[in-house]
């Protein structure tokens, strides 16, 4: 469990600013593990869902070490899950490891999409490659 102060403030700021500018914003629970697993680990956030969290230690969305995200296969699963939810931007809050992983993912993104297309993923999703950006915040 991560007890770092400030993580929830960062989560709250990202969610509320995203909603403020009109975006649909999602929590990805348990870090990259949630991105790889998809399903219930990816949930739409609301303004109220980040109320009363500033004073809490750790992070309300969890954190995890994820071996799978270090592998190409794991990142392919993560990309598929993002596309299924229509997620086009990622904000990664973490340290050196998380940001290194985000950079690897960004560099691989076009190739991952090409692989998903080969596997038969709906072609309209391809336009998302134009708009997958990473905002990198250091903890
Ligand atoms: N070189 C890498 N390639 C892909 N993913 C990575 C890499 N390094 C770290 N990660 C991912 O980032 C996660 C968090 O990294 P870690 O070093 O544990 O924490 P921190 O972000 O606090 O430095 C790892 O569990 C792994 O899933
Ligand atoms: O839970 P929300 O809606 O994010 O509101 C957070 C609010 O709670 C506080 O952190 C603490 O407020 P109190 O000192 O009144 O308990 C405020 O500074 C902040 O505006």
Image (cartoon, grey):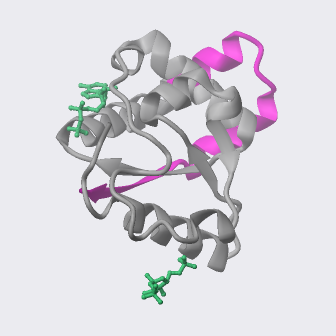
- Image position, residue 71 (x, y; %): 37, 13
- Image position, residue 62 (x, y; %): 45, 41
Count the marks. Answer: 0
- Image position, residue 97 (x, y; %): 22, 35
Quadrant containing the C terminus is: bottom left
| Closer to us: 139 or 77 | 139
Above or below, comparing residue 112 to residue 28 in the picture: above
| Closer to us: 10 or 117 | 10
| Closer to us: 57 or 42 | 57
Above or below, comparing residue 94 to residue 38 in the picture: below
**To which quarter of the image does residue 128 belong?**
top right
Q: Residue at x 58, y 71 (%)?
A: 51
Residue most extreme to the left: 96
Residue 91 located left or right of residue 6? right
Magenta-drawn segment: 112-139
Residue 109: say if magenta: no
Quadrant containing the N terminus is: top left
Residue 83 located left or right of residue 113? right
**To which quarter of the image does residue 108 belong?**
top left
Q: Residue at x 47, y 21 (%)?
A: 75
- Image position, residue 43 (x, y; %): 69, 45
Residue 62 located left or right of residue 1? right
Residue 127: say if magenta: yes
**To which quarter of the image does residue 72 belong?**
top left
Q: Residue at x 34, y 15 (%)?
A: 67
């Amino acid at each position: 469990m991560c007890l770092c102060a400030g993580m929830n403030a960062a989560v709250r700021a990202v969610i509320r600013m995203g909603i403020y500018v009109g975006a649909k914003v999602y929590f990805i629970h348990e870090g990259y593990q949630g991105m790889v697993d998809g399903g219930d680990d990816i949930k739409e956030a609301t303004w109220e869902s980040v109320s009363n969290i500033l004073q809490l230690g750790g992070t309300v969305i969890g954190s995890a070490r994820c071996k799978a995200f270090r592998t190409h296969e794991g990142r392919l699963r993560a990309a598929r899950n993002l596309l299924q939810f229509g997620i086009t931007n990622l904000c990664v809050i973490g340290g050196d490891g998380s940001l290194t992983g985000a950079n690897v993912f960004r560099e691989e993104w076009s190739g991952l999409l090409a692989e998903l297309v080969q596997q038969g993923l709906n072609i309209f999703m391809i336009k998302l490659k134009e708009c997958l950006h990473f905002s990198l915040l250091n903890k």
